[in-house]
Image (cartoon, rainbow, N blue to C red):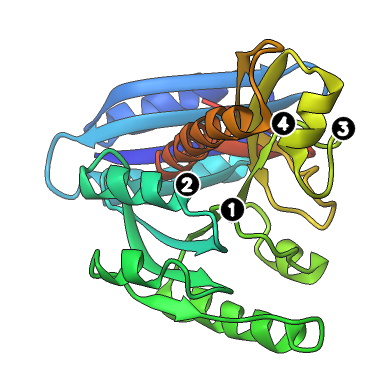
Amino acid sequence: MFILRVHCKDQPGVVAAVASSLANADCNIEESAQFNDPLSGCFYMRVVFKPCVDGAEGVFKSGFERIAEQYEMNWEVTPHKVPLKTLIMVSKADHCLNDILYRWRTKHLNIDIVGVVSNHETARELVEGRGLDFHYLPVTPETKVEQEQKLRSLIDDTGAELTVLARYMQILSGELCNDYRGRIINIHHSFLPSFKGAKPYHQAYERGVKVIGATAHFATEDLDEGPIIEQDVKHIDHSLGPRRLQTIGRDIESRVLSRAIELYSERRIFMHGRRTIIL
């Protein structure tokens, strides 16, 4: 099976044109979702289709080029079940990394982990114990440019389609975020921007918050303000201290990040300015 993604200006006949093109090429629609944004007039569509005869996928792509030109579409076709090449970055806290490795090992995430990058040696044993490549790339203010160049080479050499910041506690440069726009996912506690800096759970405890959570978003040059992909929260009360809040928060962070990776690997996320459309 294959996934067709379409983005264009909303106009009459788009859905019919897609469906007819697939049918004419002997392809069967297995799943379909679309969204028209009334404010921008943009149209988004995701279709899972199955070729009914050999070569039908190629026939569809060849014939669809004319349709796409007619409707001025941005479009792509990708295999449905081919694992997404993914590079993971982590610092010292490994709760998100552990969760991703478990979901990868048990086939709950359709990803191919091409390596793990860290600015600390803490996770080396965990990573290499899973048979994965561990890349130690320490960074200081003086070596940041050189370290990011090594990171760029690693992304390009491994063919990583997605880079996941699984509690990687270094700020990526705006240039790097822009060059890999829509290909880097970060996770943070939803206290931001209310509780920035060190010990956010202690700050939340001192302010008596009633809800904690986490947000997965695309990394941009604006720190922790990229398009949001997935969020979750949990209600709490005054009886929970900072350590307990941190435990609960880490669980939410792991679940939210893994869900964001799942959505990305299933090609469900469309960038829409500072927002995301998820089909």
- Which mark is on residue 96? 2
Residue 256 x/y as whole percent:
52, 33
Q: Which residue is mark 4?
A: 190
What distance separates the C-alpha of mark 2 from that of mark 3?
A: 22 Å
Question: The N terminus is located in which quarter?
Answer: top left
Quarter of image, res 226: top right
Which residue is nearer to you in this view: 206 or 79?
Answer: 206
What distance separates the C-alpha of mark 4 from that of mark 3?
A: 9 Å
* Residue pictured at 82% horizontal, 58% vertical: 221
Task: Judge from the rendering whether residue 188 lies leftward or rightward of residue 23; answer left or right.
Answer: right
Residue 76 x/y as whole percent:
48, 48
Q: Which residue is mark 3?
A: 194
Which residue is nearer to you in this view: 145 or 236?
Answer: 236
Task: Judge from the rendering whether residue 119 lies leftward or rightward of residue 105; answer left or right.
Answer: right
Determine contact: label 1, label 2, CB under 8 Å: yes
What distance separates the C-alpha of mark 3 from that of mark 1?
A: 19 Å
